[in-house]
Amino acid sequence: MKLGWFILFLSMLADVAASLMAKQLDGLRRPFRMAAVIGLYALTMGLFTYCMKVLPIGPAFAIWSGVGMVLISVLSMVFYRQIPDGPAIVGMSLIVLGTVVLSTMSKMQVH
């Protein structure tokens, strides 16, 4: 089970990297970068699919999407100077809170 959470974390990192790299695509003018984005998204889905064998899908997807969204938002501030406004910060805080509740209090089991 611990390996499943580690692989979920790797899947999140691949998703974040692909999303940040996709911002730099210029249509189809950068084929190598496009190939890297496609490869990272394929890796993301491959790793996430593996996780579904050993992790409950609800908490796993909530953690994957919630933490990934926050990581992308934070890294977008650093790399692209995209500063979230008040409502965005409140929304992200609620997603983080929901992720914490699901990951620490949920008793969902894998069948």
Image (cartoon, rainbow, N blue to C red):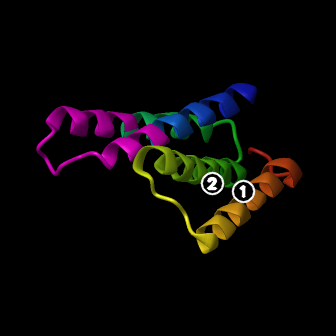
Asked whether, in this view, residue 35 is left or right of residue 110, the answer is left
> What label sits on residue 47 in the rendered view?
none
Q: In this rendering, would 81 be left or right of 69?
A: left
- Mark 1: give few (<14), some (14-19) or many (20+) Cα within 10 Å: some
Amino acid type assigned to the residue bearing label 1 in the image: Val
Point out residue 43 in the picture as x, y percentages from the top left corner.
Answer: 42, 33
What secondary structure prevails in the magenta region? Answer: helix
- 32 relative to 25, above or below: above
Label of residue 66 in the image: 2
- What residue is at 69 percent from the left and 33 percent from the top? 5
Nearer to us in this view, 51 or 66: 66
Quadrant of the frame with the C terminus: top right
Q: Which range is magenta?
A: 16-40
Q: Is residue 88 above or below residue 31?
A: below
Residue 106 among magenta residues? no
Identify which residue is drawn at 47% across, 50% down: 76
Q: Secondary structure at mark 2?
A: helix
Residue 57 in the image, given as x and y percentages of width and height = 66, 50
Which residue is more in the foreground, 21 or 81? 81
Q: Dot 1 corresponds to which residue?
A: 96
Q: Is residue 44 left or right of residue 68?
A: left
* N-term mark: 2 or 1: 2
The residue positioned 68% from the left and 36% from the top of the image is 54
Q: Count neighbours of disc 2 (C-alpha within 10 A) and say few if under 14, some if 14 to 19, many if 20 or more.
A: many
CB atoms at circles 2 and 1 under 8 Å apart?
yes
Type of amino acid at the residue the image marks with label 2: Gly
